[in-house]
Image (cartoon, helix red, strand yellow):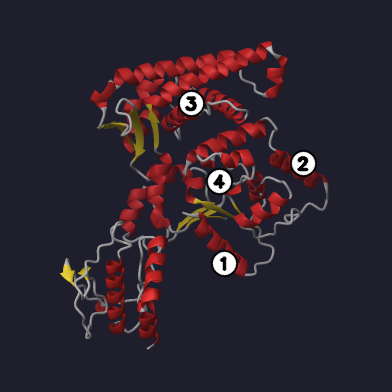
Amino acid sequence: MIYASRTHSQLAQAVDQLRNLGAVGIKSVVLGSRDQLCVHPKVQEKTAAAEKIKLCNALVKAKRCEFYNNYNRTEAMAQDTAAATADADGIGHICDIEDLVTKLKAKRVCPYFKSRSRAGEADIVFVPYNYLLDGSIRATLSGVTLQGSVVILDEAHNVMKTCEESASVSMETQDLALAIKETDVAAQFLEKSEQDAETRGEVATDLQIQDVLLVKEMLAKLEAAIAKGFPGSASTDKSHCGSAIVPLVEESGVTFDRHQWLTSLMQQIVDLLALLNAMGGKETGKGISAVADVIRAVFAEVNDAEGARQKMAKYFRLFISSSPKNQANVIYNLWCFHPGFAMKALLKCGLRSLILTSGTLKPLASFTTELDIQFHTQFTGKHVIQQNQVNYCLFVHVTYARYSSVFFEVLVRTITKSAENVALLSTFNNRSNPAYLRGLGDSIVDIATCVPDGMLVFFPSYGVMEACTEFWTNSGALQKVMCSARS
């Protein structure tokens, strides 16, 4: 079973509930990114997630990560001993990310790769949405078997947005120029390593100079094709059919038959640059990664070039814009506007069941249409408030007035001013205004006195909630609300 939700905090709550059940013999693991699980100090120095991934991969491939090397040794020892059990590492059958990091860091073992090895033997795997819905991430889940699994997407009202974002990519003209520069750096290093045994011994790579030059030639052709197809600022702020990118990619020499081989070479160059960066080099492979992402997006989940054109036409739009910081830098956005693309790709993995749960999925008809899949079973719980109990009253831009006799079960009302005529304006600049905080608190106190069965107050963020409750505690407003609730 694979349980997915939007955030790691939501996953942590689910793990706690599983632990509270006292289930015996149930093994679980939470998968996270290197942001949460990597403990290598050089990787953690990087701020961008993409840079962490590239450096980690490079260190692992070069066997320069102590934590990964120790993980490899412990895995080999576990396979050679009869005592190898699910809890041989002392983490526990049901563990969250904090358990993994705290216990394995103390043993100098990599939590990131350990979590993936545990996934292969776990009964329940907890993952964020994008690990399943993003095809590039899903391909890296080597320890997770999707075939025949039951997948639960909780808080599924967020799924459509995640589907669209996971399939969308962007590339800038600066990325192309940087990618060409990065191939020069890689070629120079390889040329030097051929002549210098000491340099060759510093980095282990299967790359050949001719491979790097081939990638450089492809990048130069792609740069020229895009410049010809969408010349300069005349093309900015315009939307095109997503299939418009396909002939430009093919013109650069990247065909359906060659794209996997070429993107594999590009990844090897990125790994080399990441390792050189860890040794003091400047380039990180950012430009090549951006171009490779576009190529993968064009040919993902299709069987031939015609399938790529049809897919890009149906699911994607190409929007071209100028960078706000540099008008000469053009951004090519391949945006997916159909969540059904990512959902269908997930279903192709041979799931036994796909279960979507949420408290706010209605209307189900439009939700399933957006996802472009049919659910054999649908269930909607009855609302706790019956329809005949509901009376809707909507007053927009009204001044708050005290009322003591309200017979509506549900009163929908927009209040713009307190009883003292203080504007209840929750803009960023006004949120710390004492008059606003006092007026908002007094309004809540007045409403609490005439709402018999309690109230639920939503805030735009935890920061705003903490600022308000601190002010109301000092002013006594919060105590008045609590007294109203008890009475």
Find residue 245 and report its horizontal and vertical position in percent.
Answer: 35, 26
Separation of residues labelled 2 and 3 (CA atoms):
33 Å
Instruction: Kindly report which numbered mark, 4 or 3, lies closer to the viewer in this rendering.
Output: 4
Q: Characterize the local packing of mark 4: few (<14), some (14-19) or many (20 or more) Cα atoms within 10 angstroms.
A: some
Separation of residues labelled 1 and 3 (CA atoms):
43 Å
Q: Characterize the local packing of mark 1: few (<14), some (14-19) or many (20 or more) Cα atoms within 10 angstroms.
A: few
Q: Residue at x 57, y 13 (%)?
A: 210
Residue 73 is tagged as 2
The answer to the question of whether label 4 and label 2 lie on touching residues, with beta carbons closer than 8 A, is: no
Q: Is residue 114 left or right of residue 229?
A: right
Task: Please determine whether, in this image, residue 44 is positioned above or below residue 388.
Answer: above
Separation of residues labelled 4 and 2 (CA atoms):
24 Å
Q: Characterize the local packing of mark 2: few (<14), some (14-19) or many (20 or more) Cα atoms within 10 angstroms.
A: few
- Depth order, front residue of 393/477: 477
Residue 35 is tagged as 4
Task: Please determine whether, in this image, residue 487 is positioned above or below residue 241.
Answer: below
- Depth order, front residue of 226/106: 106
Q: Earlier in the sequence, mark 2 or mark 3?
A: 2
Residue 320 is tagged as none
Regarding mark 1 in the picture, which secondary structure is present there?
A: helix
Report the amino acid beneath label 1: Gln
Separation of residues labelled 4 and 3 (CA atoms):
22 Å
Report the amino acid beneath label 3: Ile
Q: Which residue is mark 3?
A: 288
Q: Which residue is mark 1?
A: 17
Instruction: Kindly report which numbered mark, 4 or 2, lies closer to the viewer in this rendering.
Output: 4
**Which image quadrant is residue 436 in?**
bottom left
Q: Earlier in the sequence, mark 4 or mark 2?
A: 4
